[in-house]
Image (cartoon, grey):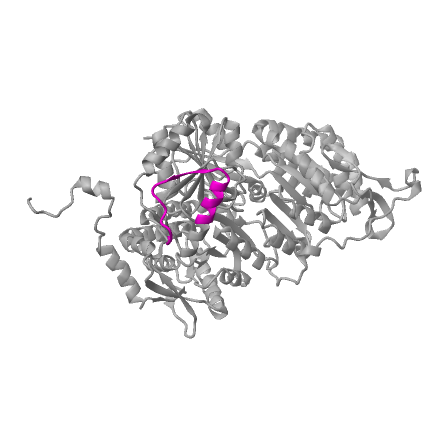
Amino acid sequence: MAGSTAKTVHDIFQSMEYGPAATSSTATAQAWLDHHSRSLGLFLDGRFVRPADRQSRSLSDSKGGILCSTVHAVEDDVSQCASSAVKGHKAWGDLSCHQRAKVLLRAASALGQHGPCLSELCDLCEASCSSSSLVRLLQYYSSWAQLRDALVPDWKPLGVVAVGASDDCSLYSLMLKVLPALAMGNSVIVVPGRSSAPPALLLAQLFTGAGLPAGALNVLTGSDMSLCARVAQNASVGYVTYSGNKQDGVLLCKSTAGMGVHVSVSTNIGARCPFIVFESADIDSAVDAVIETAFKKRREVHWVLCVQESVLKSVVARLGHRMAGMKCVALQSDGDRGLVDAAVQDAQQQGATLVQACAAPPSGAHYPPTVLCGAAPSSPFVVDPSPGPLLPLMSFRSNTEAVALGNHSPHGQAASIWTEDLTLALETAKSLAVGSVWVNSHSVSDPCLPVSGHKDSGTCTDGGQEGLYQFLRPSSSSSPPLPRSTPVSMDYSKFGTAASPPAIIPEDSASASAPKVYLQFVGGKPCKSVSGCSVAVQAPGGAGVLAYCPDGGRKDVRNAVEAAVKVQPGWMKKSASARAQSLHSLAKGLEAKRRDLAASINVQTGLSMDEADEEVELSIARLSDWAAYCDKMQGGSPPLPQPGSALSIPGALGVVGVVLPDESPLLSMVTLLGAAVGNGNAVVVVPSEKHPLPALAFIQVLQSSDLPAGLVNIITGSRDQLTAALATHSVIKAIWYWGSAEGCQYLQYTCTSPLKTLRLSCQKERGRKDWTLSHPSLLEEMWRNAVQWKSVWIPTA
């Protein structure tokens, strides 16, 4: 029509302007906020509560306007919330599995009805999350709620679970922990971050309206992560799990150390993730994906582009062509502009070249998408990325070098691989130490697949059936792993340094009547301690010296870890059946030495020979159990709601430190050792300081077995001193500890940089543990503690 001002399709594509936004959902979200007078209270006992005299903080929208305010909860609110959660857990737990599943399905229906409101509220709060992804979560976990007693009959819910999130955590990541906890029959206290607080409050209201009992889901808002620590301090809370950035996760771990509550973290914000492009890739598709994930989507992670040298020029040229005309990206604050300028200047000084969409403005909180070509793995802008739209680019020559670049990071969140060679893709995916690998795709997620945090990306598994076990415990477990307590005042730098002085071996120790002198076991060989000193092992009741064993220290732990690191990758690559045969061989060797082992137990613990022989027999049976377990946890390919295939792959943790209890010194050792080694891990074992002789006698069995040298290392000495050495060693991935309450507190406080998976038990408080129990759920719990999961996504057209 002549004189019309309407733009043509060509004009719209040239300017790339946004079309008019729909107003109905906006009005719905704004109406919900107006209904609460733009001042959101706490959600306690199935209703909104706004206590008087509470501080609040304002939440701004993307344009800088005040969107609403949230309340700062105080101690009285935490106590009221915990009491409500206890009542809610009873009401929710008394329902049958079918009834809980029906409630979650009604919640999914309600969410589908109010999805536009939730989506718009998430956009306003800059906590982007589609309602369809949350509906998928609800549908998936409603099925697990239905099947809980049928598929995991020997497990029961923990009780009250606290779920915390950092200010920059997405709503999806938060609900990925909330919904499985509810599905397993727990009540949940949610402590959301700044951006996810309003959507979390809306969801709590919708779920309660769908039939969730009052108190089963509560939402507390605050000013920082200290609120989550105060929630964890309440004795009613049985488990705390966190999602967000590492800084807040570390703060939570340290704040809760010594409280007697287990804390797991998923540090899925700010990780450095490799985007690997091989020469066999569809280059155009790879470049389009790079542009989308690095510059157009909300960046929860920092991507590093790795390109094979043979196609480097082609990729750089297409990046430049594809980025031409792109607009500047808004930064979160004016202060971020200084960080971006410093990173670009540093990159240019190190020889990097820039590929920019347009010229950078002289100032302001905007910056153009920029690729920093020629980056080195050790460059500061790669190691510590700035918050702006910067993409470092590195090159590699071979698959081995690509894996090395991809693993050259303290994080293990995810990776994207681009190649048309499926064999190359799977080989690379298995070699990368990350939780999720996307082949010819990126940023795909679904709750059916388990994902573990590798390295510094977390200490728990979310998603799939495997992710449910963090919210359950074996029914036969009569007491919690740790007693609830008040943290003691400790100087963490001095823990383990006040060991008693080592004994000096008498000169007549070589005589027939002198106590025997034992050696420790490192790298497949019996050896003395690096210090050259030994400690005296007392007979039961203090009736003299039984023997002398080495007084191990930090250098012995270092040597043991070095030996374990060399052999563990090869052991992990062995087939499950090969590992099973090695454990059967170990059990056979233990059978051959049963008389010697029984004698050591008899002399060390004072048990009768019949009781000692029974413990040896149980140890042989336990090793056979673990041999049978070896090929029983092999992951699989669960059905996906979208086209394509996916794999869930179990893998080893790496090097595990095991500090043994005083009870059942041989049986407890083979129980923990078998679980770790059977899953492909290497171990550094610290025997009981009170009863070390059975573990040292077991060295003869290890020497005659076909286990690789260095896979199992045994170091004796002061428990606290060796625990401190294990905790501060950067290579050890997990520590299983039986010891004092102070030792548990020390490990919770210290094992945060890097993050270590902890299994803690305060044996003095719990008393004697019956290691003779062989209930399937107890063995499965130990087995699952020794494995981490990886998901591999392979899309199809």
Q: Position of residue 237 (x, y in %)?
A: 52, 59
- Relative to 69, does residue 133 appear above or below in the rendering? above
Residue 375's spot in the image, x, y percent? Answer: 48, 37
Answer with left or right where residue 341 lies relative to residue 19.
Answer: right
Nearer to the camera, 51 or 298: 298
**Number of marks present in the image shown:** 0
Question: Which one is in front, 154 or 164?
Answer: 164
Instruction: Please indicate whether residue 414 sits to the left or right of residue 484 in the image.
Output: left
Q: Residue at x 60, y 57 (%)?
A: 257
Quadrant of the drawing holding the C terminus: top left
- Outermost residue to the bottom: 53
In the picture, measured across the screen, residue 564 lies left or right of residue 93, that is: right
Residue 348 sits inside the magenta stretch: yes
Task: Please state, as top left, top right, bottom left or bottom right, where the N terminus lies in the image.
Answer: top left
Q: As rendered, which of 104 and 454 lies closer to the eye?
A: 454
Q: Is residue 333 visible?
A: yes
- Please tell me which residue is depicted at 54% across the width and 49% down the height of the picture: 475
Q: Is residue 145 above or below residue 700?
A: below
Q: Position of residue 601 (x, y in %)?
A: 77, 42
Which residues fall within the magenta stretch?
341-365
Q: Quadrant of residue 512?
A: top right
Q: Nearer the viewer, residue 522 or 474?
A: 522
Q: Position of residue 387 (x, y in %)?
A: 44, 49
The reply to whether residue 413 is visible in this rendering is no
Magenta stretch encompasses residue 331: no
Residue 416, by quadrant, is top left
- Residue at the far left: name it: 2
